[in-house]
Structure formats: C-alpha cells, structure tokens
Image: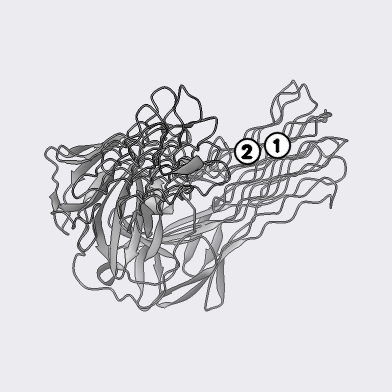
Amino acid sequence: MGYLGRRIGKSQTTANPQADGNTGGILDLFSGGYFQRTGNMPNAPGIPPTGLTATGGVISDYTDGLAVYRAHIFTSTGTFTVTAPGTFGDTVEYLVVAGGAGGGYGSTSPLGGLGSGGGGGAGGYRTNVPGATSGGGGSAESAFPVSTSPGSYTVTVGGGGAGGVHPVGRGVSGGNSSFGPTITSTGGGGGGGSAPTTTGNPGGSGGGGGAGSPYPTAAIGGSGTSGQGYAGGLGSNGATSGPGYPGAGGGGAGSVGSDFVSGSAGGPGGNGVSSSIDGTATTRAGGGGGGAGPGNTVGSGGPGGGGAGGANAPGSSATYSTGSGGGGGGWSAANPGGNGGSGIVVVRYQIASLTATAKATGGAISFYSGKTIHTFTGSGTFSNPASISDVEIVMVAGGGAGGLNIGGGGGAGAVLEGSSITLPASTYTITVGSGGAGRRSAGPATPGTASNTTISFPGPSTWTANRGGYGATYPDTASQPGGSGGGGASDQPTGGSTTSTPSTTPLGTLTSYGFAGSSAPGNFQGAGGGGAGQAGQAPPTGGSGGAGGFGRRLPATFHNPIVAPGPGTGPQVGGGLGSPGPLGGYYVAGGGGGSSYPTSAPAGGAGGYGGGGAGATGSQNPPATDSQSGVQNTGSGGGGAGYSPSSPSTSGNGGSGIVIIAYPS
C-alpha cells in the first residue's frame, strides 16, 4: 500500500484524554513520510469516478494497488457526516474496536487477599472489510450503506477501563464503541483480582481469572462475545499455585487468554487481529497478561497492544487507541492492574482510481475537489507523457535557522505560486530545499544556510524559490537576507532583507511571497524572522523576543487533506499546514521567533503562523532553554537561541520546503 497522508477533519481537531491517561485523539500527521509513487499511470478519457464527500475524524488517504481509499480515523467520539454521494457506490467499510479492560488487583494483604490479578480483556472487534476477520473468529460483516439523508452518523469511541484497586479487586470493564445506530462493539471484561472478585468479567473479550488463597477454586475467566472476541484464561488457586499465585491472561480478539502456567507464571494475553483499513497493517485488541509473584514470570501482553502483568509490581497499561487489555497486578504488596487501552473506529471508502485520473507520475498523488495533486516533500521528478493545461503550482523553499546567543529568528523560505500554466510533455526535476541547520552556542557561531527549491526542465529553464535567511547571532554574525530575511539581534540589530522576486520561465511566471526580518533594539533581545505573509516583529519592551512574521495561506486548490504535514511536535503558534492561522488552516512559511533575555524576561517570541519555531527564553541560571525548529515541509524559520554563560543552547532548525502541483482530473 502507498501511504498518502493524514489531516485533521472538520469535526475533530483535537484529542480528548483517554482513561489510560494518554491523549489518543491526534495521530502523528507526518509520521512515515509520504509515499513516493512511480510507474506509468495513463489518463483514461471521460469523467473519472469520484468517492463520497464526507467529514469527521482524522482523514488518511492511501493507495492499494490502483485503488485510492480515504479512511476516517476516530480515536475519540465524533461524527461521520456524508455531504455528497459518490460514484463508487453508497457503502462504507468499518472497523469498530471497543475500549479494553483494566487488569485485576494483586496483593499480599489479608484485607486484599493473597494473589495476582488477571489480565484485562480486549474490547470487542467488528469489521466488514471483505476478506477480513472479526474478533472471536467471526467473518467480515455485511456492507454498510450511507446516504446524505440523514447524512450524520454518530461515532462513539469507548475509553479504556481502569486497573483494579482494593477493595474492588477486579479491573474496570472497557467502554463500548459504536458506528451509527446499529454497529456496537462491547467493551472488554475486567481482569479478576486477588480478592474478593477473582473471576474475570465477560465482555467483548473476557477478563482473565485472578488468583488467591485461601480460595479453594481456580478463578474462572470471563466469556467473550460471539463475533467480537475470546474468553479469558483460568487463574490459579491457593491449593495448587504455590507462592506465586499467578493470574491468567485476558482474552484477545484473535485468541483466548492463556491459563496460569504451573505455580509461578502468569498467563499471556490473547492475540489481537490485524487490519489494513487505514492503509497500514496494524494489530489491535490484544489481551492483558496475568500478574505473578516476586521473581516469577509474568504473562506477556497479547500482540496488538496488551499490557504485561506485573511481578511484585503494578500491571502495565495497554497501548491507547488499540482496545487492548491492561496487565494484572503482581502478588506482593498492593499492586493495581494496568489500565485498558481506549478503542478506535475507522471508516473507509474508495475515492479514486489511479488509472482513471492521474496524467503524470511523481510525488504523492492525491485527488481533491476535481483536481489531481502531486505533493513532493523530497526531491524527485514529475513526468507527464502528454501536455497538461490549467496547472497550478506552489513551491516553498527551505527556511532559515535561528541565530545563537540571544539570537534572531530565522526567515521563512519564499513561497512561489502560479496558475493557468501549461506543462508540455516532459520530465521536470524537482529539488526541495532543506532547512538551515541550527547550531550550539559552544560550536560554530554561524547557523547553517538553507537551500532553494527549484523546478527544472529542458531548455534549460528553472523556477526558483529563494531560501530563507538565518537570524543574527550576538555579538558577531549579522542576519542573512533571503526569501524572507532573518531577524536581528543585539550588536547585530539590522534584520535581513527579502530577496523574494517573481520567477519567470518560458512556461510562465510564478509570483513570489516573502518579507524582511525585523531589526532589534540593541538591548539583548532577538527580533522575529520574516514570513511569507508578514514581516518579522520587533521585540516589545520588557525583554521578550520578537514574534516571527505570519506565513502565507495556500490557495484553495491545495486545501487538500493529503498535503497537510501537520503541526509538528512543538507548541508552535502556527503549527503546520493543517493548523489555524488568521483565516483558518493550510499556512506555510512562518518566520521564527527571536529569543529573550535575561532570567526574568517573558518567553521568547512566538513562531509565525505556518510552522515557525518559537524563540528560546534566556537564562543565567539555570541554563537557557533551546528554541523550536520550523515544522518540516513548511519552509518555516527556526527560533533564536537563548543565552547562558554556564552551558550552551541550540538555535532552531529551519523547516524543509515542499512542491505541490495540481491539474484537473
């Protein structure tokens, strides 16, 4: 399968904390990169078929052979809304996984019993993907028709159950997950505790039996639900288990939880089941492992995210958004069970066929609003066997790095835009510019230089987007000019100028956008680097750094779910292409923020909308904090580094660029 990317849908922009304490609602929107598609894809005549138009969840488009699918991934409760029918049919495929259960409590206390906890059962697992397997050995379910009337389908994602604690003992069962009014998966059954509730609960998959003494009977595992999951295993008892008093494994969607092993080993959790409904083969809904005594072998978590049991320790929690069970707590002292993992709901449908729509090869190919879009996040070639008219192009150069030692913010790479362009049959070489490298203040004083983004073709001829300039470094390195200029710093106060100019070839002119960096006042403050939509900002009074200039919002053609690399890992104000700016999402090329000084100063300057990195907060003791880097594939500038005489700090890297080419499908 070829992965094309993800974005945050209109009905879900943030995650909600799950019961296991993790935030499972946001996936990494740029993990794994983009799929680089190659090969011949001839354009078929006529109007190509189209898929449904729908919103909700985190959207992931990918190829499977010549088919292009769109998956809506819900890791928290939301709504799947169909707004227009498609020509690939009126049915969708789903995966509905309920929340996994918590593992049981383990204890040596006379008040809590003597024994280990059983593993939590996995949440119920239901799917109708043809040829796939539902939980409990069930076959794929029937097709699910959708329409614009009613159009909205409620999606409920069950939370993971909490691990068992004294005096309840048994783990809490997981919450149900559902899609629409008819498809519901049952939450996993809680794992049995050491006392007084040693039996596992029933559920989508059943909880494993706990263990204890003086209880004379082995603890029975909970039953699973037909077509959703398997039963939990059998826990030990005081007469046969010896000092370990191990618990059993919780049931998984793919197999039963294992019984305790001899007198000292907890039972492993049942297996999960793999699905590729979101474009990546992923195993989910594994059972939790049973706990055991000190020095004994614990039950491993079932494949798919199940938590392992504990040995003289609490049980491990399951992986969030897998619907897996938590591990049972170990015998000795008071050890709670691990929390179950939250569930997940995925809905997918076909949106295009590569043989029917693509007129060229190269980059990550996606389809949006009647356009075929090629996204290059790295260098490559765009090859079209026939002339293509009405082409739209966006090019973003690499962003500049932030300066050091109360440094200025890096300037963004220039953004080039053009439309109504005709590309004759040819091979076009795409070079995506890299961001400038940040530096440690104890190393070279000059930040690394970013690089241009280009499209070259026979002639020879080239469109060029100019790289962003780096920020100034106190006291000896001036800011650099660029597509957008870097910000100034103390003793090097002048901001870098813009070198953003139109780029002309025989095929047309692309308009360039970029602004200068701000100058610094000279009182130990870094100024903001320029963005593609606004000049860098001067530092305000009070010691804080200047903000980076706003980036530029992409043209409407490119407000495509597939071309949004996402917000990055830091709390940048602008985030990435999918994050909101003054007019909404899809901003690129924000300037980096300048740094602040000294310890009492407010925080460093904010990064500009579109992915600019924030500047660092200066410090004398403790050491200065490092600044943020620009978000990759937005061409944004990095933040300026702080200053500390006791230890070095690092300036932010500039973000790499991107090239996006669109034409009518």
For label 2, count other residues whose C-alpha is less than 10 Å away and answer few (under 14), some (14-19) or many (20+). Answer: many
* 55 or 430: nearer the viewer: 55
Horizontal arrangement in the rendering, residue 323 relative to residue 441 (left or right): left
Q: Residue at x 54, y 50 (%)?
A: 634
Whether 311 is drawn above or below 52: the answer is above
Tell me residue 458's x, y (percent). 52, 78
Relative to the observer, which residue lies in front, 477 or 502? 477
Q: Secondary structure at mark 2?
A: loop
Q: Mark 2 and mark 1 in contact? Answer it, CB < 8 Å.
A: yes
Q: Quadrant of the C terminus?
A: bottom left
Where residue 42 appears, as percent x and y from the top left, is 30, 76
- The CA distance from mark 2 to mark 1 is 7 Å
Q: Quadrant where the N terminus lies?
A: bottom left
Question: Mark 1: few, some, or many residues within 10 Å (few <14, many ≥20)?
Answer: many
On the picture, is 627 further left or further right than 233?
A: right
State the SS at label 1.
loop
Kindly identify which numbered label has been placed on residue 535: 2
Q: Which residue is mark 1?
A: 518
Residue at x 44%, y 39% (from the top left corner)? 328
User: Please, what is the three-letter code of the amino acid marked with disc 1?
Assistant: Ser
Residue 557 seen in this snapshot? no
Q: Give the percent coordinates (x, y) of residue 373.
A: 38, 60
Label 2 vs 1, first from the N-terminus: 1
- Quarter of the image where one finds residue 38: bottom left
Q: Is residue 91 left or right of residue 609?
A: left
* Coloring applied to the structure: one colour
